[in-house]
Amino acid sequence: MIRVAAVGDIHLGPDSAGTLRPAFDTLGECADLLLLAGDLTRHGTREEARVVAAEVGGLPVPVVAVLGNHDYQSDLQDVVTRELTEAGVHVLEGDGVVLTLRGIKVGVAGTKGFCGGFAGRSGAEFGEPEMKAFIRYTRACADRLGRTLHELRAEDSVLRIALMHFSPVPDTLAGEPLEIYPFLGSYLLAEALDEAGADLAVHGHAHLGTEHGMTVGGVRVRNVAMPVIDRAFAVYHLSPNGSGPA
């Protein structure tokens, strides 16, 4: 059994330095891995990234992260990534990492993801160049996620987790205004999950959403935005025998 801790949308800044560290320091007692589902900073600045790095550096468990839209705000996403990487965080975007936890191989595939909407209420690659580029970016994120999950399966990872910021399903958006669903995620991400397979999918972004959801193909999805889980992190238990997250 692998214990996966996860949280997103922590939105740290200089005035919140040290607020999560006491909770994170307990991870060795209750988890084997920490996933960060994006929006780690408020405006994606180097100063904020350093606060996040200090919060999660040197923890008793490995840390894997993706960035969120807030982390791109200052066009310094490469700087944010570098600060976190130097603190020992595995920052993913269209790639993955394989970790051995308690003797079990766990593969994490990560992408920020993007918008577009869900079945029957989604954008399409049609019309103006700007609209086509919008959806193509989402499709590229989903394609990279699916490709990485396939690669992890080829490496015989016993458990595979998809980590993203934007949601792959509308289930975990329940509570958000319907008008903004297209800006909270895309069905293309769910298609990638169902085609490649995963034991768990984790996302953030939807502060007013719901924790539990599922793709059409049966992949369990969890919205771990901090305002949703209402704690420093949620913990899910995954078993190599195929039982889902508890």
Image (cartoon, helix red, strand yellow):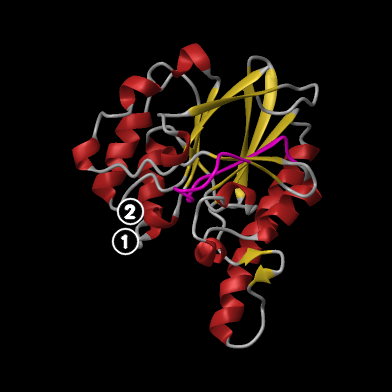
Query: Is 151 above or below relative to 105?
Result: below
Q: Amino acid at mark 2?
A: Gly
Residues shaded magenta: 198-212
Query: Where does residue 178 sit, x and y in percent of width and height?
Result: 54, 62
Query: Where does residue 71 sit, x and y in percent of width and height?
Result: 38, 53
Residue at 38% in and 37% down:
86
- Asked if the stretch drawn in magenta spans residue 202, the answer is yes
N-terminal label among 2 and 1: 2
Residue at 66% in and 69% down:
121
Q: Quadrant of residue 129?
A: bottom right
Query: Where does residue 52 sit, x and y in percent of width and height?
Result: 33, 38
Q: Crowding at label 1, few (<14), some or many (≥20) Cα neighbours within 10 Å?
A: few
SS under mark 2: loop
Q: Amino acid at mark 1?
A: Ser
- Asked if the stretch drawn in magenta spans residue 7, the answer is no
Q: Crowding at label 2, few (<14), some or many (≥20) Cα neighbours within 10 Å?
A: many
SS under mark 1: loop
Q: Which mark is residue 2?
A: none
The image quadrant where one finds the N terminus is top right
> What is the spatial separation of the Cα atoms under label 2 and label 1, in whole angstroms?
5 Å
Residue at 32% in and 20% down:
22
Outermost residue on the top side: it is 29
Q: Are marks 2 and 1 in contact (CB under 8 Å)?
A: yes
Query: Is 238 above or below relative to 193?
Result: above
Query: Where does residue 184 sit, x and y in percent of width and height?
Result: 53, 58
Q: Quadrant of residue 78?
A: bottom left
- Which residue is nearer to you in this view: 100 or 27? 27
Q: Main secondary structure of the magenta part?
A: loop
Residue beneath label 2, please? 44
Q: Is residue 174 left or right of residue 83?
A: right
Residue beneath label 1, please? 74
